[in-house]
Amino acid sequence: YNVNTIDSPALHSGHRIPTNTDSRNEFLGEGDDVQIAKSVGGDQWYSVSVYDYDINPSYKIVKVHYIWEDGNWYYDWFSNSNADMTNPDIEVIDDRYIVVYQVDSDLDSYTDLAYIWQKLDYSEYQFGVIDINVADYEQTWQMSITSDKFYYDPEFVYLYVTFGLWTWNGYEWIANIYYTASGDGGNGWSTPVQVSNNNLSAIRPGISIAFGTQYSGEDYIYTTWRDSLYNGHCGRIDFWTNEVTTNIVLPSYEGDDGWGHYAPSVSAYYGDVFVTSV
């Protein structure tokens, strides 16, 4: 596992701040890339990338909105004084929520795959960057996170992230989907595995988890993307072996002018997998 936590004076956070409205549409409409996660108990958590000039006058921050025990809306915020925090996605497990996002953490003009986790009792939180190290020059774009919390007891839950990655091979940039996992609540992450075949085009990869049963030894992660001709692909990653199987599931019959410029969405329940697109 790669562990790369960040301790920097440029990183800041604020917690359990009242939202001055009862309208969910109002405070979620102020930013970009709104994503939602639901706990096993049914509570909802939203992440959003937003400008808030009272917190950071120069760069986008990440806010997490939620309803607290008193029935009112609150938010937490996370800020990097030197760079935008964009394209967040969120998951919530037994004792914490985890947000993955895109940021130029070391100010080298290439964005990294970063994460924040915050314990739900507010006893701890952590900023970090997931080490990729696929190429000398690489840049992340769009990421998705989920977990197997609905299948396993809390102590056995894993987090799963898929993300787009540009890599420089010496004469051109190549785009692919990669996958990584964490079995310790987001502290350490596995070495990323390439899922697509140098043919990624549409952004924001879909992600879902599907298992056969807890006892079958067949645990699969599914993710989706489009290629440069807008064909919709679904990739299946075997959790135990990292073996990847991919198929075109939504072909685009008109090539460069075909329909579906966004990645398909994917959902799964045990052996049933559903892929949809617009």
Image (cartoon, helix red, strand yellow):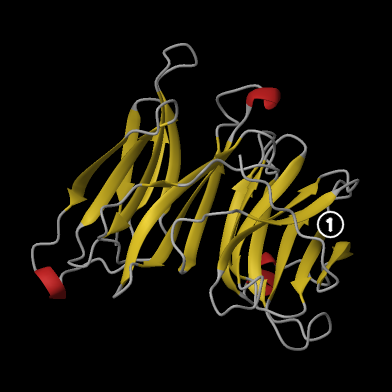
Tell me which residue sits at (80%, 62%) in the image: 76
Label 1 crowd bin: few (<14), some (14–19), many (20+), radius 10 Å:
few
Tell me which residue sits at (60%, 62%) in the image: 101
Q: In which quarter of the image is residue 9?
A: bottom right
The answer to whether residue 110 is left or right of residue 177 is right
Q: Give percent across and percent down for residue 7.
A: 82, 61
Q: Which residue lies furthest to the top in this view?
A: 215
Mark count: 1
| Front residue of 168 and 162 | 168
The answer to whether residue 123 is left or right of residue 109 is right
Q: In which quarter of the image is residue 172?
A: bottom left
The answer to whether residue 255 is left or right of residue 177 is left
Q: Quadrant of residue 87?
A: bottom right
Query: Is residue 22 visible to us here?
Result: yes
Q: Tell me the element at label 1.
A: loop
Amino acid under label 1?
Answer: Asn
Query: Is residue 25 visible to us here?
Result: no
Tell me which residue sits at (19%, 59%) in the image: 231
Tell me which residue sits at (74%, 54%) in the image: 5
| Front residue of 172 and 273 | 172
Compared to 43, does 152 lie above or below? above
Q: Give percent across and percent down for residue 82.
A: 73, 80
Quadrant position of the N terminus in the picture = top right
Q: Give percent across and percent down for residue 114.
A: 63, 60
Compared to 94, does 63 lie above or below? below
Q: Which residue lies furthest to the left in this view?
A: 253
Quadrant position of the C terminus in the picture = bottom left
- The residue carrying mark 1 is 72
Q: Give percent across and percent down for residue 152.
A: 59, 23
